[in-house]
Every structure is written in structure tokens, then in C-alpha cells.
Amino acid sequence: MGAKKIARGALRSSIGAALVVLMIPGALPLAFAATEEPERADVYGATAGTSPESRNLRRVPARKSLSVTAGNSSAKPRRAAAHASAGEAAGLHRTPDPLALKSSAAMVIDLDTDEVLFSKNADVVLPIASLTKLMTALVIAQAKLPLDELVILNQDDVDTEKRSPSRLKVGTQLTRGEMLHLALMASENRAAHALGRTYPGGTEAFVAAMNATAETLNMHDSSFVEATGLSSLNRSSARDLVTLARAAHEHPIIRDMSVSPKAKMEIGRRNLQFNNTNRLVRRADWDIGLQKTGYIAEAGRCLVMQVNFAGRSLIMVFLDSVGKYSRLGDAERVRRWIIDNLPPATNESVAQKLTS
């Protein structure tokens, strides 16, 4: 009995990492791979590093996509840190890639042609933190619930799992549309939870709708247990999240709310300003049509964006990035690589894809 209790305790303490490892073919040798050594402060908008891989970037043939998997890593496994993310525990941070990304998993596709431009551990299932809120928004948008209906926060909306802070007090009254705006733009967890709680049938019905939507979209590597992303049991892969971003991008309300730089809302007697969690939306040199950030310890720093540059409409997904700004640095590295190495998608290639 003692051995069984110890085994159950170990499983509970590492359930996120354990499930990830089981979903990676041949990943058991990486189960205790070490995390990256502490990185230097990531420069906002940094270019690719000076590793041997990054120095060879310009030799990549035009229109050739990059694809790497955990199996490419020859690093010797070491035991992971006590509070490692699921990706770190699986050794994914040690997967080399030509762009020297800080993210454990990533995928970039051309939205018009479906061409995969970059892929790194794209099918590995990981916790996705607040990227969950894109699915929350999609379910709300598809349900066509009245956005002007008042939603009142109650004690059930308070986070008791991670005890995350919120500027929305119990009793706050906002419209469903305002709650959706704050969930997408400012990643307000209480707002997201309230959206699920006030869905017809309540939270249980909402979670069922989230998983049903994922199934309809053929997101077979994805599963959801709640609306905020605070639970590490909300999981997906970079490839599935490309699919989710594509579906969410079809709804103007999700696009507009997610990229709003800031919003002022009258809450009780207070007039509060909320800012977008993605600082790239305030950059004039980035044309972003959809975005969502995410972070919990188990998931690391995550980012999903639809962006336009170099004559292309792209979806970028970055999961389990190390460092506060490293996911933004990764986005910049990919953008510069595409601009420098890949020609714009031609109208002819788009037409061929659309008619094939």
C-alpha cells in the first residue's frame, strides 16, 4: 500500500509532464532531460542568436519549410528542475532548431496556401494556459448569445487553483461583450470563467461545447476542462492551435477584441483601463489580425497570432517559451527569417491551392 501511495503522489505532482511524455513517440529517454541553462535577458524584438544553426539561416533554400522534432536532439538527459514546465520536463527545450527559438514547440503556416513554413515539435501535446480563451471566445461567438446581456461576477469566478489576481471584484456587472473583450485582450480569468458559467446549461455544458467544437475542427490532440486556461489539463498541440486560430479568425468580433491595444471600462465607481497582454499590438511594424497570449508555470510562455507581412497572411504558434519576452523574440526571429529567405506567396500559388 505504501508503494501505491507514493506512486499516486508522484503522478499527481507531475501529471502535466507525465501525460506530455506519453504523447511524444520515443520520448521516454527525454523524460528527465534538463531544462535550458538560465538565459540572458531576452531583448525585445531580438534577432536570431549567434548559434551555429542561426549563422546558417541564409543558406536555407527559398520556400523550404523548417521542421524539427524532439527526436533530433542528441543532448544527454538530466533530471528536470522542480518547477519545470511540461516541455522542460520532457526535454523539449533542448531540441535544436535553425532559428534558435526559445519555444519548445512552434508552427507557422501560410493562411492562404496552407503551406507549413516552420515546424518544431508541432504535434507534441502540451498545456496551453490562456490560449484556451480563444476556444472560449469561439464557443461564445458560435452560440450567438446576446453580447449586451449583463453578466454578474460571483464567488465561483474567483480562481482558487492558481489564486491569480484580478481587477474585477465579485459583484462586478459587465455585458457579455465586455467580459469577452477583457478575456481576449487582457486575459481576465474571472471574465472568462463567467462566460462559461453563464452559458446555457452552465459550466459543464460550456466545457462540453468546447470539446465538441475541438472535435468538429478535427483538433484531435486537444482537450479542455475549463474556460480560463488556469488548469494544466487544458492541452493542445501547435498544429491543433493553428486550426483553432484559423477558425477564430473567421469571426470579426474575436479578431477586433483580441488586438485591441487597451480599453477603459466603468466598473462600479471606478473607471479602469485594461491593456493588451501582447505588446506587439502596439508596434506599428506589426500587422496583427488576431492574437492571444498565455502563461502558467506548467505551460511556459505561449503565443498565437495571425499576422500579415511580406505579402503573406500567416498564423504563428509558440508554446512553452522560456523568459518573459522570449515568445515575442521568437515571433520576431521567424518574421525576419521569412522576410529574408522566402518570397511572397504569388497569386498563382494561392489560386492553385484554392482550386486543388
Image (cartoon, rainbow, N blue to C red):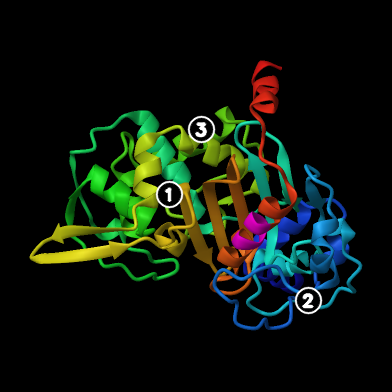
Say if the magenta span includes residue 10. Answer: no
**SS at badge 1:** loop
Residue 112 location in percent, x, y?
A: 61, 32
Q: Which portion, as a residue range, is magenta?
A: 332-336
Residue 34: mark in rendering: 2
| Label 2 environment density (alpha carbons within 10 Å; few <14, some 14–19, many ≥20) | many
Front residue of 126/246: it is 246
Q: Is residue 70 left or right of residue 169?
A: right
Numbered-mark total:
3
| Label 1 environment density (alpha carbons within 10 Å; few <14, some 14–19, many ≥20) | many
Q: Are marks 3 and 2 in contact (CB under 8 Å)?
A: no
Name above or below for residue 115 compared with residue 154. above
Label 3 sits on residue: 213
Q: In which image quadrant can residue 71 be found?
A: bottom right
**SS at badge 3:** helix
Task: Residue type at mark 1: give it.
Answer: Ala
The residue located at (51%, 64%) in the rendering is: 295
Q: Is residue 168 visible?
A: no
Front residue of 200/251: it is 251
Residue 227: mark in rendering: 1
Residue 213 location in percent, x, y?
A: 51, 32
Q: Is residue 282 left or right of residue 26?
A: left
Looking at the image, the residue that sits furthest to the top is: 355
Say if the magenta span includes residue 333. Answer: yes
The Cα atoms of the two marked residues, 3 and 2, are separated by 36 Å
Label 3 vs 2, first from the N-terminus: 2
Residue 53 location in percent, x, y?
A: 83, 66
